[in-house]
Structures are given as structure tokens and as C-alpha cells.
Amino acid sequence: MTLRPYRPSDADALYDVCVRTADAGGDARSVYASDRLMGDLFALPYATLEPDLACVVDDGTRVVGYVVGTADTPRFVERYRDDWIPAIAGRYPPAPAELTDDATPDDVMHHLHEHPERLLVPEVAAYPAHLHIDLLPGFQGQGLGRRLLETFAAAASAAGADAVHVGMVTANTGARPFYDALGFHVIPVADSGPLTYLGRATRH
């Protein structure tokens, strides 16, 4: 297994790994109208806008995992709105103005896409970096996630971030021991919705 920097030619692999792990750690294929939707929210904007922080696991034939993120969440939010939303304009239908009880899974994700300011959670402002990390199930439990995360943390530290946070889907109970083992702690957030916020120093 090789950890290496992300290349633009890895884009399709990132889409694939992302959707196969996007349902609270499980396979989200067929959950949304497009299997590329999850990647367009949670993987490709980071790899495209912050390629220096993107790292993949290559098994010699394909990419089987990755970490992506930003060292500066407020700046990333600005770039997502100014650069990423226009870059994929027309790929998905407009989100409803407000989410109601009958909102579809696609409605919810389109709404998240159109509101990147959701990432500006006051309680995590002291943890300016944030990340998304995914490994295909057959490659979990081998220390690759730890290597990916520590690679990201070192790069984020070099970019000026002294702490990092993740917004973990609370229902993804399998991920919590991973973060606990790497020194993350809960960041209390008053209105966290479906997420649990975890943080730690980038130098650990």
C-alpha cells in the first residue's frame, strides 16, 4: 500500500470510494439520483481547491482510500461558494428554499451544497482545519486510516493550522473508536444536528 499525493486522474476513484462509504460508513450507491453527488460535496471540492492537503492510498492497481480537507475552514467556505459552486453549476437541480419534513435525500444534499456557510460552526472556530477521510471496507483496520490522518495533520500544521476538527455522522458508530484512538475529543456544539464534532491538535 502506498500513500501518495492526489492527482487529478484520481477523481473517478475518489467519487467511487466516497459513495461506497457515504451512508454512515456504508454503501450509498443508489441512495441519491447521482452516485457522484457525495463526491461533489465531500471529496472533490477539497481535492480540487486544496490539492496540497489531499492524499490517497494506492494498492498498486487503484485508489482505495483518501483524506481531503482544508487548513482554513472560513477560507475554504469562501472558495467553495466562489469557485466550486460555479464549477459544477447545472449538474444538480436547485435545492428547495427551505427543507421540510418531506424533503428527499437529494433535497437535503443539494441544500448543503448551496449553503457552504454551514461549515462555520462557532464552537469549532479554534480548530480551523477540517477533513474527510474514507477507506473502502476491505482496507480498514490496517493502520492506513491512521497514516492518512497523520499525513493530513502534518500538512495542515505546516499550512498554519494548530488544530483540526471533523464533523462525524453520529450514526457512524464504527468511526468513533478510530478518532478516539487518535486523540480526538468531543467539541460541545449546541445545535449539532446529525453530527458529532471532534477535535485535536494537528501536532499530536
Image (cartoon, rainbow, N blue to C red):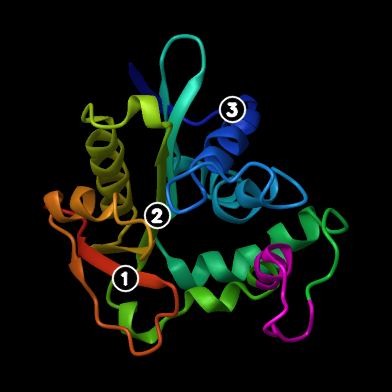
Instruction: Report the span colored magenta.
Output: 96-111
Residue 95: image location, x then y, percent: 78, 73
Residue under the image location 72 percent in, 79 percent down: 102
Which amino acid, by three-letter code, is at mark 2? Leu
Left or right, residue 180 beside residue 93: left
Instruction: Return the residue at label 1.
Output: 197
Tag 1 or tag 3, which sits nearer the N-term?
3
Instruction: Return the residue at label 2.
Output: 131
Element class at badge 1: strand
For residue 80, what is the image quadrant?
Answer: bottom right
Element class at badge 3: helix
Per the image, is 39 magenta?
Answer: no
Left or right, residue 85 beside residue 182: right
Viewer-proximal residue, 90 or 129? 90
Marks 2 and 1: in contact by CB < 8 Å? no
- The residues tagged by marks 2 and 3 sit, at their Cα atoms, a distance apart of 18 Å
Element class at badge 2: strand
Which residue in the rendered view is the most extreme toward the bottom? 190
Q: Nearer the viewer, mark 1 or mark 2?
A: 1
Which amino acid, by three-letter code, is at mark 3? Asp
On screen, residue 63 above or below 17: above
Is the N terminus in the top left, top right, bottom left or bottom right quadrant?
A: top left
- The residues tagged by marks 3 and 1 sit, at their Cα atoms, a distance apart of 29 Å
Viewer-proximal residue, 133 or 5? 133
Residue 26: image location, x then y, percent: 47, 44
Viewer-proximal residue, 74 or 192? 192
Q: Residue 10 carries which label?
A: 3
Residue under the image location 42 percent in, 47 percent down: 25
Residue 140: image location, x then y, percent: 31, 31
On screen, residue 49 above or below 110: above
- The residues tagged by marks 1 and 2 sit, at their Cα atoms, a distance apart of 12 Å
